[in-house]
Amino acid sequence: MERTLSKNEAKVILDLEWREQKIVTLAEMRAALDTSESYARFFAHKLVQKGWLERLRPGLFRLIPADRGRAGVADANPLTAGAALVSPYFFSFGTACTHHGFTEQVFAEIYIACRVRRRPLLVRGKRYLFVEVSPARFFGFQELTVLGEPVQMATVERALLDAIDRPQHAGGLGEVSRIVARASTRVSWPALLALAHRWQVPAIVQRLGYLLDLHQADISDHVRTALVDLTRQASKIHLGSRGTWGNAGKLARPWNVVENVPHDVLVSKTDQPRRRVVFHTKGLLRDRRQVRGPLRPQQRAAR
């Protein structure tokens, strides 16, 4: 179905296009029309029906410009919709780790770091999960162009620290372990150390150091010493949630991390060295018979 516009609708849409305004609120539409809120809602509803606006959440709409064709095909990039849902914001956790190539896991949610507490939203069949971050720790992101649209994305280093800090938003502790292994060759260690020093949460550095040792990451002695200096040697932490994994485990030094998570959860089978099996010629037939068991009468007759 082709899109049409009335005279008043054309004025609003053309004005948005001329100003290159992609997001419009109900309040802005009401002011432009100089009308009541009820009529502004009706007006916006008609533009949604005609394919000129896309409703992101109550009172917030995204323009579907003329260059999207006669049918008004909406932009399919889930990050562009997420960028309009809250401000200020940046994408992080599983979303940023996927963007930076640290994980192959497909996440059902889009993770958005913001300064306010918000309930999850469902837009275009995609669930957006908002993670509240204190103003003191609202750093470590940059503007990137993703599928032709500018968005705020956590840096490589911030995405890694966020995943370690809240593994439930990055596929769980097992996936975070593999994220650390992949990210260890990509991060800028001076940048990561600067972030960790500014963050001032030793537990994140302790878990990072433990996972780096687990995967035998190639880091310099200087970086390793700097990471150890950021930990609290007097306090020990558990690698995983005690409610999920319990309290028992060995203490891994120098990180003072209690290994309460099974090794096979943290390291995938493909990452583990394969055990070499050697067959000895002597006694091989005897061993095979022991595995197969004694011959049946029919088998003896056949021989």
Image (cartoon, rainbow, N blue to C red):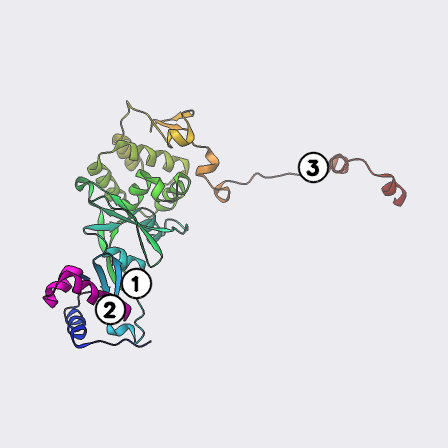
Q: Which residue is mark 3?
A: 280
Mark 2 and mark 1 in contact? Answer it, CB < 8 Å: no
Q: Please, what is the three-letter code of the amino acid marked with disc 2?
A: Lys
* Separation (CA) of disc 3 from disc 2: 80 Å
Q: CA distance from mark 2 to mark 1?
A: 29 Å
Q: Is label 3 or label 2 in front? A: 2
Give above or below for 285 relative to 125. above
Q: Is residue 99 magenta?
A: no
Q: Measured from the top left, where is residue 182 in percent x and y?
A: 38, 46
Q: Would residue 188 be seen by someone viewing this image from the given angle?
A: no
Q: Earlier in the sequence, mark 3 or mark 1?
A: 1
Name which quarter of the figure residue 150 lies in. Answer: bottom left
Residue interval drawn in magenta: 26-52
Q: Residues within 10 Å of mark 3 (few under 14, many from 20)?
A: few
- Residue 273 in the image, given as x and y percentages of width and height: 51, 40
Q: Position of residue 185 (x, y in %)?
A: 35, 46
